[in-house]
Amino acid sequence: MRHLLDTESLSRDHAIAILDTAQEMSAVGEREVKKLPALRGRTVVNLFFEDSTRTRISFEAAAKRLSADVINFSAKGSSVSKGESLKDTAQTLEAMSADAVVIRHWASGAPARLANSGWIDAAVINAGDGTHAHPTQALLDAFTMRAHWAGLAGTPSVGGDLAGMRVIIAGDVLHSRVARSNVWLLRTLGARVTLVAPPTLLPVGVEHWPCEVSYDLDAALEKGVDAVMMLRVQAERMNASFFPSTREYARRWGFDDARLARLDALALKDTIVMHPGPMNRGLEISSAAADSPRSTVLDQVRNGVSVRMAALYLLLSGDLKSTPAPAPSAALPLVKDLP
Ligand code: CP
């Protein structure tokens, strides 16, 4: 595997290798000196054609913690506004010796185009493309669930997956690359996923996805759930009216105070509430839920750095080239070799 473009094509072995390596990387974040020499002399380019806070900053932090040189490119304020193409932009950056290009783009398929075009030699990591995929978000979500699941009894186990875990993904599925990437990865890791959304916010063909679909959040919660992942209402991608009002949306599909209390009433004491961010507080999630002890929102951000360190390290070291992926022990000398 040379690139990380989506989770649909990510094998279970490769997914587990990334999660296990991220587990090792997270230990680095606990140290006083949070740096590894693993990618010294390598260059990572962050190529962002769409806005981002968490993904862009955490890829930068991840690359720097691995001692790589980092070039941050934002389309805003660049020669893209003068009409420069993706090909010319990417080749310009590769002329500056990029080893990895982390790309976020408004167009679904742009990272695959970059990876498969022959325009550049660098490894390509998809940091979110249109409504298509956001693989590192799904990996950090899985890492967070796995840490919680295994962490109930202690430290997450290396090699563990999410077998049998019940996950609800609720909200604006239609516009969500996070939902798509999570559905595929969670299926690969053995979890059972239920999508909940108004009919207008479900994509055509969702019945062929490897998950259940419901329009009723309360009914889905009543069946029992280990993780509830709320999706952002992506108003900026909406060119029509998809629900009657924000008040109606919050009442029927938002994770509000009443639904937070319902988890207690259902004795679901270990159920976590997730959100990839940025959040529309009061719409898809209430402040009480976002700030509750069940919320993993900030854990997800923290875990994003470890997961992105793992993805960068494994792609640039070539450890994901072999199939199946190396056993976790083969991926770990990096950490063990550290001073
Ligand atoms: N979750 C996520 O992708 O957030 P950003 O848009 O801030 O990167």
Image (tube, rainbow, N blue to C red):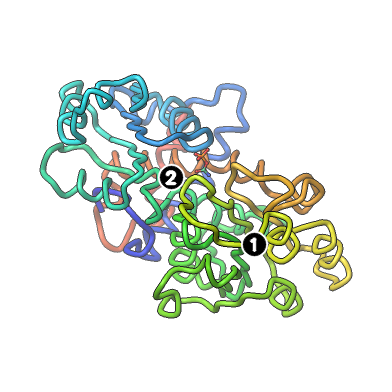
Looking at this view, name the residue that lies furthest to the right.
265
Residue position marked by numbered label 2 in the rendering: 332
Image position, residue 70 (x, y; %): 36, 23
**Ligand 1 within 8 Å of the CB at mark 2:** no
Separation of residues labelled 2 and 1 (CA atoms): 52 Å
Q: Secondary structure at mark 1?
A: loop
> Badge 2 local density, few (<14 within 10 Å), some, or many (20+)?
some
Residue 101 locus on image (x, y percent): 29, 35
Residue name at image x 54 percent, y 26 percent: 34
Horizontal side of residue 315 vs 232, given as left or right:
left
Residue type for callout 2: Leu
Residue at 34% x, 41% y: name it. 105
> In front: mark 2 or mark 1?
1
Residue at label 1? 244
Residue 148 seen anywhere in this rendered image of the structure: yes
- Secondary structure type for disc 2: loop
Q: Nearer the viewer, residue 81 or 103?
A: 81
For badge 1, the amino acid type reads: Pro
Q: Is residue 47 above or below residue 269?
A: above
The structure residue drawn at horizontal position 38% and vertical position 60%, both measured from the top left corner, is 7
**Residue 204 drawn at (x, y percent):** 41, 72
Q: Quadrant of residue 324?
A: bottom left
Viewer-side residue, 325 vs 258: 258
Q: Is residue 171 left or right of residue 327?
A: right
